[in-house]
Amino acid sequence: MRRPIAVARRHPRLPTSGVVLSVPSLLLALCAVPASADTSGGTPVRGTASMGSGVLAHEGEQGRPAGTRATQTEGVDVSSHQGNVAWTTLWNSGVRWAYVKATEGTSYRNPYYTQQYGGSYDVGMIRGAYHFATPDTAGGAAQADYFVDHGGGWSKDGRTLPGVLDIEYNPYGDTCYGRTASQMVGWIRAFVDRYKARTGRHAVIYTSTNWWKQCTGNYSGFGSTNPLWIARYASSVGELPAGWDVHTMWQYTSTGPTVGDHDRFNGALDRVKALADG
């Protein structure tokens, strides 16, 4: 998700001549570059993607949810773009669940993961972690392993939601990561199967209907096992991908209060707890 930055921040200059940096010093200097920085002249830096960033860029924001009599539970999703999150503010506003980006590919880890994952838990939220998929860099099973090994696991404590596979528009290049529909389905299958083998839980799949149609051929084979988190910034969830009759979660805006990305769980808080329980 594409975070609006309210205040421009200055960052220390890197030496340009006459100084040779040691490896640790260079790494520290590079870490001062904001997570959303684009140092490649147009293509985002690997690791800076976040849930919905591609959806917003390709599909835009078409409105906010209309009034509904259905019970829904407010949630948020965050990544390094939000930095240290004001979890108490969110809790007081009615947010009861959260997902935190843990990993991307097989090399990126969210540097704010501890504050975000632990902070949401500390204020009373039910929370989980998500992995931003990059099918052009490594296989699905390898990425599932990396995710589980670095914050994406699950525990039956009643407060931990199953991990999420964020599979959407490629912010770094070809929309479908250079894969055919059948190859993409195989990649997703490898990820969710390995996640299930490692944790005992079916991963949630986050995607948009338009991307799913384009890049998987609207494959219908995951709906019976994997909960759906649909991305659509509009007045309703709209058409769902093939195989799912209902959605579990809905990311409905990238411009909500405090953190930008806000979501609704399709049910009351007891249903959120049921998903956490397994």
Image (spheres, grey):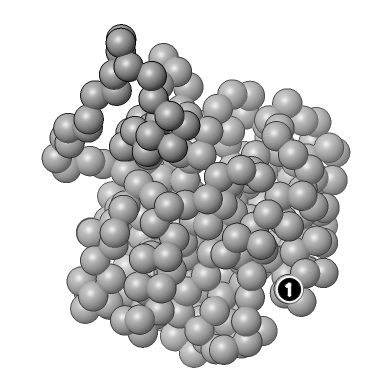
- Give percent across and percent down for residue 164: 60, 61
On-image quarter of the N terminus:
top left
On-image quarter of the C terminus:
bottom right
Task: Specify few, some or many for label 1: CA neighbours under 10 Å numbering under 14, 14-19, or 20 or more.
Answer: some
- Give percent across and percent down for residue 271: 53, 85
For image coordinates 39% across by 56% down, the residue present is: 112
Front residue of 48 and 28: 28
Q: Is residue 35 above or below residue 180?
A: below
Q: Is residue 11 above or below residue 261?
A: above
Three-letter residue code for mark 1: Thr
Can residue 255 be seen by looking at this rendering? yes
Front residue of 109 and 159: 109
- Return the residue at label 1: 199
For image coordinates 47% across by 65% down, the residue present is: 99
From the viewer's perspective, tell me whether residue 105 is left or right of residue 220: left
Among all residues in the image, which is located at the extreme top? 17
- Give percent across and percent down for residue 158: 55, 89
For image coordinates 54% across by 79% down, the residue present is: 160
- Give percent across and percent down for residue 117: 43, 69
